[in-house]
Image (spheres, coloured by chain):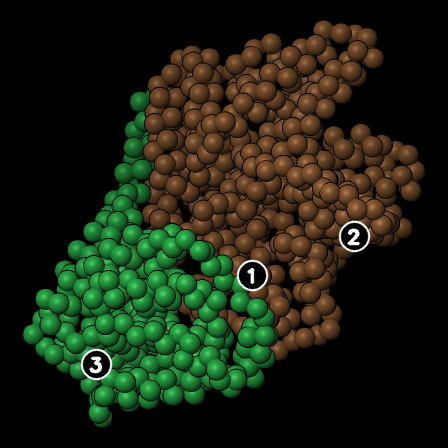
Chain colours: A brown, B green
Amino acid sequence: MLFNSLDFLIFFVLVFIVYWALNSDYRKQNILLLLSSYVFYGWWDWRFLSLILFSSFVDYFIGLKIKSHTNEKLRKRFLILSLCSNLGLLAVFKYFNFFTESFANAMSVLGWQVDSVTLNIILPVGISFYTFQTLSYTIDVYRRKFEPTKNMLSFFTYVSLFPQLVAGPIERAFNLIPQIESKRIFSNSLFKAGIFQIFIGLIRKIAIADNLAVYVDSIYGNIEIHNATTLVIATIFYAFQIYFDFSGYSDIAIGTAKLLGFNFNRNFNLPYFSKSLTEFWRRWHMSLSFWLRDYLYISLGGNRKGIIITYRNLMLTMLLGGLWHGSSWNFVIWGGIHGIFLSFEKFIFSISKSKDFNAFGYIYTFCIVLFSWIFFRTQDLDSALIIVNKIVSLDFGQPFIGNMNSFSNALFLLILGLAFDLKLFRSGIPLEDYGKKFGSTKLAFILALIILILSLFYSTSENFIYFQF
Amino acid sequence: MNRKNIKFIVKILALTLVISYVADKLIFYALNKLSDQVMVGQTGGKLNHFLSLKDTLDVIVFGNSRANRHLDVSMMSERSFNIGTDGTDIAYFTTLIKTLPEKKEQLLIINIDTKNFFESDYTGSDIRALKTRFMRNEIITDELRASNHIKPLQNVFYSMNYTNRVLGLLKNYANPKYDYRTYSGYDPLVLSETQKSIRNIIVAEPNKRICYETLRVNPAALKYLKELKTHLEESGKTYVFITSPMYDDPCTNYQLKLTELMREKELKYWDFTNYFKNESDITLWKDKTHMTKKGAERFTKMLIDSLSIKN
């Protein structure tokens, strides 16, 4: 079920009414949330519910086992069991074909002919997100940062809560489980903030991102025939398409959760207003970048084991972070580019004793991010290299515009989206709280205006970009 | 949640709906007024122009961008129009043909391509290109409703009829790029140097179109074809279906199957797909499916000879 569908609107209105009618007993609300989350997920393919159930069972029991043992060896064994189960699911469903094909290719380079075994596997929607969520629970329990819940219903609801199930934000147990295990209070200000954020999410996704996608897809579908000017424009459009697509999704998820009385963590904080790549990663897909920092970078030793190990850890974290996005070397290279420049910045900041670049940093950061998006967007390494080659060899010329109407719509909406982001940036108020400042009549006017913009500029896309990850 | 909260939610939602409903109607009315004055551009102006002329025309060309770029109707008659429109197909032009006057003698040249006739993903959604006339033209409104390609919300929010067309309409209103009174609907392709280099790359590449061996007529295309046949017979129009030339079309079985289908339905059909196949002159082409002005003029002359049309 897609957030931008009529199905979801009907589904959510029904859940919302019944949910608040059960307000006297939060346990009944949790039963409703769990069942409705399974319906929400099963709408795509009910067979994959078994994977969520498996993941939930494994980490629920392992969490309790880790808590019940004081013997560190045993605790570690249970943690490894959780890691193997969750990462095993990911390995089979997401990376099996990638690893076998890469192995066969590597062997053929060395002169050995190996037939790669591939499986005809469909990638279950959201597997990367809920797997990381359950893993964070077990690791936090193992690190004694969080007491495991004994309530199976709470834990299963935590894993599958529908607003964040398929594309995050990756919520930590210490933020969400206490909310699940206590009475949710409806407040008018939370409702205002939630509904405003949902509408902003819709406009970001349906109007801005999907209109940008029309041009991006047409250019990236035929990179060979376009010059560098066109490819740069398409890549700039893509940079904003993926931002508005994914931040729009997160806005709808966070806003929907607010309407149910939950507070999720922020997932995007105007990332293109960053003066360094380090800052960019504190603003882009925050739930993933903080997850990687807390459970991968720090687990590898972080910056506690000397400068060389710190750079190694940074690179490894970004390479694996890239691989998390999908089974392609392009994602690994994308992560590698970020890793290299993050290391570079770490070095510069360590010798200059500053924490940021000057205003020039905005341009520097955007250029690096833009360059890395080429690898992220293209289907294979050859395509990415064609684009890089055209840009490096200064194959500039008159840009290809295609359908002028589509192009001008995309440009107009991009300017609109950026103007709103600039206003947010200057106001210093997070989008998550922005709706609270409006009176009810003013809010209604704003929502009506958004409805009209959507009526006049919506575009249709079957999916959100991050569903494929 | 208490009564106060419920009141608050109802107030915001009701206000939002009322304001958006009223504003939607105002915008729809304003856009209608504006749109009626726009006679240029593919966002609605060309359609307006055609609807204003259709009852007086002798020759009309229908079809997609290939029809639009390949047939210079001004060479056929002074009272002619090419309503070929990018991205449209049989659902779109069947509906337009139904709007033509019944008693007037008119020659209809209808360009059809094999793709949508034999591939399963065609649903007739090209009819949506007529949505600026939804709720404003009875025939088009009925056809749109019958097609199921109108979104349920479109019955409430009428401004959705102008989705993604507002900027184009405004631009064409403020700064029309040609004088519509001298425009025949034909848009010749004259290539810039950049386009020529893109063309050279495109035509050098092997054709990637996937051709299936087992062919089944697409149900949506067939439905419209049957409706069109009935309408053409009842209205007594002179017509010919054509497929205009392509640089190369690997799906020869599709061509044969379409010819067979048209013969079966007793519809007059000429297949010119391979008309320029033996010519090596690349300047006839913009890409593998669209001819340049030079190619279009040669093709139009040949078609005129075939139809025995005199100026």
Do tags 3 and 2 sit on the same chain? no
Q: Residues within 10 Å of mark 2 (few under 14, many from 20)?
A: some
The chain letter for the residue carrying disc 1 is A
* Residue at the (30%, 84%) spot, across then down: B303
* Residue B311, horizontal then vertical, whole percent: 22, 93
Q: Which residue is mark 3?
A: B59
Assign the N terminus of chain A to one quadrant of the image: top left
Q: CA distance from mark 2 to mark 1?
A: 29 Å
* Residue A141, horizontal then vertical, whole percent: 70, 17
Q: CA distance from mark 3 to mark 1?
A: 38 Å
Q: Amino acid at mark 1?
A: Gly
Q: Which residue is mark 1?
A: A221
Image position of B76 (left or right of B248): left
Q: Quadrant of residue A43?
A: top left
Of callouts 2 and 1, which one flags the residue occurring earlier in the amino acid sequence? 1
Q: Amino acid at mark 2?
A: Phe
Q: Quadrant of residue A139?
A: top right
Q: Is residue A189 visible?
A: no
Image position of A189 (left or right of A58): left
Image position of A9 (left or right of A287): left
Q: Residues within 10 Å of mark 1 (few under 14, many from 20)?
A: few
Q: Amino acid at mark 3?
A: Val
**Which type of secondary structure does the marked residue at label 3 adopt?**
strand
Do tags 3 and 1 sit on the same chain? no
* Residue at the (56%, 24%) spot, across then down: A52
